[in-house]
Amino acid sequence: MRQVFLLLLLLLCCLPLGASQPDLFLSCDLLSLDGLWKETWNVRLEAQLALSDQFSLNLPLTLAAERTYAGSSYLEGGVFLAYRPFSRRSYLLISLVQAGYLESYLCEEEHQVLFLHEMGLGYRYAFPFGLQVDLRLTVRDPNGVFASEYEELASCFSAYEMVRLSLLVGWSFSVPSPLSKEG
C-alpha cells in the first residue's frame, strides 16, 4: 500500500510538468447541503488538475457523518481520471485509487479501511472570472466488485446512495509550471 501511495504521489508531481500552464479547479458539492435537514451529512470537496485538453486528475475528499443513527463517520479520498473525448465540457470519470476510513459502532471492527470504485458522467459550465459549475452523475461500484464494502457502508448510514447527483461549484485558475517558457 505504501508503494502505491508513493507511486501516485510521484505521478501527481511529474505529470503536470509537461503542460505549459495547467489549470487547477477547486470546488465544493452544493447538493450536499441537503444534509442540513437529513440524518446523513455528506460533504465533498474536490481539486482537479488539468493535464491536457482531454485528461485531468481529480482529487476528491468526502466526509459522511450520521447525526443520530449510531454516530457513524466516514472519510474518503482518491485519485480519479477525467477523460474528455468530445469536448472540454463533457467528461467521463473513473476512480484509479479510492479508499475510505470508516468509524462506526455498528461494524464488526471499530475502525475499518475500505477500498472502493466509482464511475461518473459530467458536464461543465464555464462562466467569466474562472467560475465553473459541474453537473455530475456518479455510480458507485458499477460492476459489483466491492459489494461487501458498500453493504457495510449502507448498514452504517441511514442514507447512502449508490447513484449520486452532484453540483460542484468552484473556481478555476492557471498554475505556473516550472517548465513553461515565458519570455
Image (spheres, rainbow, N blue to C red):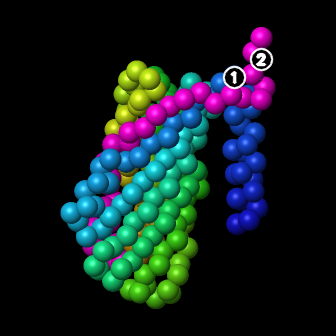
Where is mark 2, residue-wise? 181
In which quadrant is the N terminus drawn?
Answer: bottom right
Instruction: Decide: is 13 above or below 181.
Output: below
Whichever of callouts 1 and 2 sits on the residue coming sooner in the sequence is 1
Side (left or right) of 164 relative to 78: left
- Magenta region: which residues? 154-183
Where is mark 1, residue-wise? 20
Image-quadrant location for residue 13:
top right
Evaluate whether residue 82 shows in this view.
no
Mark 1 → mark 2, Cα distance in angstroms: 8 Å
Point 44% across, 63% down: residue: 63
- Tell me, yes or no, whether the two marked residues, 1 and 2, touch with CB atoms within 8 Å: yes
Residue found farthest to the top: 183
Q: Position of residue 148 (x, y in %)?
A: 44, 74
| Disc 2 secondary structure class | loop
Point 39% across, 57% down: residue: 43
Instruction: Decide: is 25 above or below 107.
Output: above
Assess whether residue 172 is covered by the magenta stretch. yes
Image-quadrant location for residue 115:
bottom right
Point 38% across, 39% down: residue: 169
Q: Position of residue 58 (x, y in %)?
A: 54, 44
